[in-house]
Image (tube, rainbow, N blue to C red):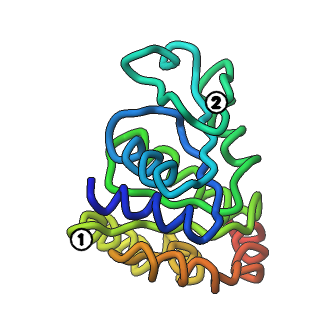
């Protein structure tokens, strides 16, 4: 929770607008709190069934209510200039892998970052590296994912991100 709140604060200090799922609970709620406490702009994108008192974050700069989870991801993609995943479960992984796949196919050229708190994502990187070794993932696509346990360093790495255009072209030919 401390790292999440710190991430929000750093985003605000850097003038980076936070786009997130609109909830007040968990790590992303803490990111939103940190950004708001530091005077940042925070936009939530939520579905009606989650737009309830116990779940929805209040006090955001703006809350967009969309019809379903597909529309939610599309709206966040439309608004975002980059993506950061904190430790999480199925929902986080779903959004993360969709974002990585979109980068792989050229649907976007935005940086993707993982805040690797307590080395949470190390097993995932081991699996991805195994997929590279087995030929299922191009090495250039593995490099699409920026990773650090320090929010400042992660954002610095993401700022330097260069999209692998040639790998996208090759993947689209070879599939």
Total labels drawn? 2
Residue at x 38%, y 57% (from the top left corner)? 86
Q: Nearer the viewer, residue 36 or 3?
A: 36
Q: Which residue is mark 1?
A: 119
Mark 2, residues whose alpha carbon is within 10 Å: few (<14), some, or many (≥20)? many
Mark 1, residues whose alpha carbon is within 10 Å: few (<14), some, or many (≥20)? few
Element on which disc 1 rests: helix
Tell me how far mark 2 sits from mark 1, CA to CA.
Answer: 32 Å
Where is residue 54 drawn, in percent x and y? 37, 18
Q: Is residue 169 above or below residue 100?
A: below
Q: Is residue 24 above or below residue 31?
A: above
Where is residue 100 drawn, in percent x and y? 57, 61
- From the image, which quarter does the C terminus lie in? bottom right
Element on which disc 2 rests: strand
Q: Nearer the viewer, residue 115 or 59?
A: 59
User: Reading the chain from its start, which is encountered first: label 2 or label 1?
Assistant: 2
Q: Which mark is residue 63?
A: 2
Where is residue 90 drawn, in percent x and y? 37, 40
């Amino acid at each position: 929770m401390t790292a999440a709140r710190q991430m929000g604060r750093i985003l605000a200090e850097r003038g980076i607008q936070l786009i997130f799922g609109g909830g007040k609970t968990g790590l992303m709620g803490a990111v939103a709190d940190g950004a708001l406490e530091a005077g940042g702009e925070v936009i939530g994108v939520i579905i009606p069934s989650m737009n309830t008192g116990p779940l929805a974050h209040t006090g955001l700069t703006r809350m967009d209510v969309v019809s379903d989870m597909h529309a939610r991801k599309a709206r966040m993609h439309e608004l975002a200039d980059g993506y950061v995943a904190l430790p999480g479960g199925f929902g986080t992984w779903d959004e993360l892998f969709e974002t990585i796949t979109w980068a792989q196919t050229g649907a976007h050229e935005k940086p993707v970052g993982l805040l690797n708190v307590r080395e949470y994502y190390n097993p995932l990187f081991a699996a991805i590296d195994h997929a590279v070794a087995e030929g299922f993932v191009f090495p250039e696509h593995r490099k699409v994912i920026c990773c650090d346990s320090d929010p400042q360093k992660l954002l610095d790495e993401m700022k330097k991100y260069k999209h692998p255009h040639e790998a996208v072209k090759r993947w689209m030919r070879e599939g």
